[in-house]
Amino acid sequence: MRGMIPAIAARSQRQREARVSQTKFDDDDPRIAHNRVWFNLARIQRSIGPRIARALKAIGIDDPIWYEILLEVERAGPDGMRMAELEGRLFVPQYALSRHVSRLCAAGFLRSAPLPGSGRARQLHLTPAGTGLHDRIWPAYMEAIQAEFAHRLTVDEAYDLSRMLIRLYP
């Protein structure tokens, strides 16, 4: 029975590829192609995102964005990073980023300090518990990502798609 599972997965993959290659778009308005990109990206996020989030929750990470926050703050070095800069790098709205940063602070991974004379501006620093945490998160994160994509895209297709998606950044 075990030997059949890879064969079934391969057959399922071939069927999916055939279905996609045969998909016809008979849109009256060619601009609909851009709408299709948007809706497909949104649906992929909604279908795959929760499974990846569950894999991270199993190791104590409440949200996948925590990995990116910790990584960016660690990359900033010992001086830390301004919250506004992090917001711009991650394309996360201020209210959502504030919520995640508060949770990371409560978990003991980040420290947030007010910047003198700048109103509500905050500087983020890793705590000793947060230092290197992204390295401990990465194996579970990578495994979850691979489980979702590796059987659907070749390495070359993944790079090609990444290049296309990067063009969509503002």
Image: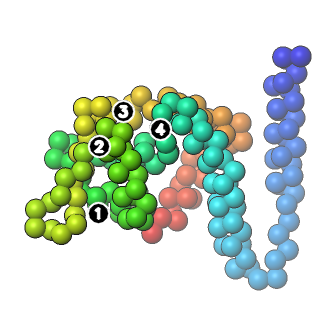
Query: Label for residue 61?
Result: 4
Assign a secondary structure to mark 2: strand
Assign a secondary structure to mark 4: loop
**Quick one: which residue is furthest to the left in this view?**
117
Q: Give percent across and percent down for residue 89.
A: 36, 58
Query: Which residue does the image show at 55% across and 31% down from the upper left?
Result: 58
Chain-order first, disc 2 or disc 3: 2
Question: Looking at the figure, which quarter contains the N terminus?
Answer: top right
Q: Which residue is mark 2?
A: 110
Chain-order first, disc 1 or disc 2: 1
Assign a secondary structure to mark 3: helix
Query: Label for residue 84?
Result: 1
* Foreground: disc 1 or disc 4: 4
Amino acid residing under circle 4: Ile
Q: Give percent across and percent down for residue 159.
A: 56, 46
Amino acid residing under circle 2: Leu
Q: Nearer the viewer, residue 70 or 39?
A: 70
Packing grade of label 2 (10 A; few <14, some 14-19, many >=20) is many
Q: Nearer the viewer, residue 142 or 51?
A: 51
